[in-house]
């Protein structure tokens, strides 16, 4: 399991991460990632790869919001996001969408008047009743 380590001080190094996770450092590999956004902002965060999911969960539980060089450090499970999906929240496909539909011109989203002019649906219960109806 990979663990995200955010809100790192500028002076933090990989050795500082090893010291911060000293109780769990034997079971993990650490690295610091530097990224630059489209607007020029620089991002810096750490990643820890744990061999055991159980150890990773313990580290998250014990070290989240502990201070390193006077700054509270965010420790949580790392979720890899594709480049196109970088800004979307985790699990966004499973949430219901209550906003306006983007594809208003689609056939399936015809006008309200067309939907009202359609024939009302006939409900037939049971196989024999359906056979008699046809």
Image (cartoon, rainbow, N blue to C red):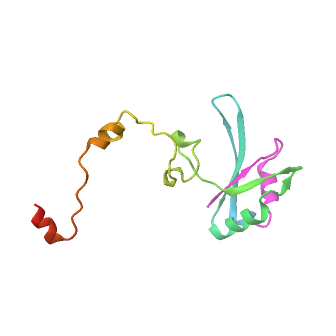
* Residue at the image position 21 percent from the left and 64 percent from the top: 124
The part of the image, by quadrant, that contains residue 61 is: bottom right
* Residue at the image position 12 percent from the left and 62 percent from the top: 133
Q: Is residue 15 visible?
A: yes
* Residue at the image position 68 percent from the left and 28 percent from the top: 40
Q: Relative to the observer, which residue lies in front, 6 or 22?
A: 6
Q: Position of residue 16 (x, y in %)?
A: 82, 52
Asked if the magenta segment contains residue 33, the reply would be no
90 versus 63 height, above or below: above
Magenta region: 1-24
Locate residue 70 relative to residue 121 in the image: left or right: right
Q: Position of residue 120 (x, y in %)?
A: 25, 51
Q: Position of residue 95 (x, y in %)?
A: 52, 53
Asked if the magenta segment contains residue 15, the reply would be yes
Q: Residue furthest right?
A: 70
Disc tally is 0
In the rendered view of the protein, which quadrant contains the C terminus? bottom left
Locate residue 43 relative to residue 65 in the image: left or right: left
Q: Is residue 110 visible?
A: no
Q: Position of residue 49 (x, y in %)?
A: 65, 58
* Residue at the image position 51 percent from the left and 46 percent from the top: 98
Q: Relative to the observer, which residue lies in front, 5 or 88?
A: 88
Locate residue 16 relative to residue 57 in the image: left or right: right
In the rendered view of the protein, which quadrant contains the N terminus? bottom right
The part of the image, by quadrant, that contains residue 56 is: bottom right
């Amino acid at each position: 399991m990979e663990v995200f380590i955010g809100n790192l001080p500028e002076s933090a190094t990989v050795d500082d991460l090893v010291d911060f996770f000293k109780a769990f450092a034997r079971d993990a590999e650490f690295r610091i990632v530097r990224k630059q956004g489209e607007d020029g902002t620089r991002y810096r965060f750490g990643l820890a790869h744990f061999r055991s999911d159980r150890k990773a969960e313990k580290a998250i539980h014990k070290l989240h919001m502990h201070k390193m060089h006077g700054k509270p450090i965010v420790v949580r499970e790392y979720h890899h996001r594709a480049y196109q999906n970088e800004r979307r929240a985790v699990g966004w496909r499973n949430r219901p969408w209550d906003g306006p539909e983007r594809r208003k011109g689609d056939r399936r989203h015809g006008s309200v008047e067309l939907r009202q002019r359609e024939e009302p649906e006939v409900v037939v219960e049971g196989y024999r009743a359906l056979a008699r109806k046809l």
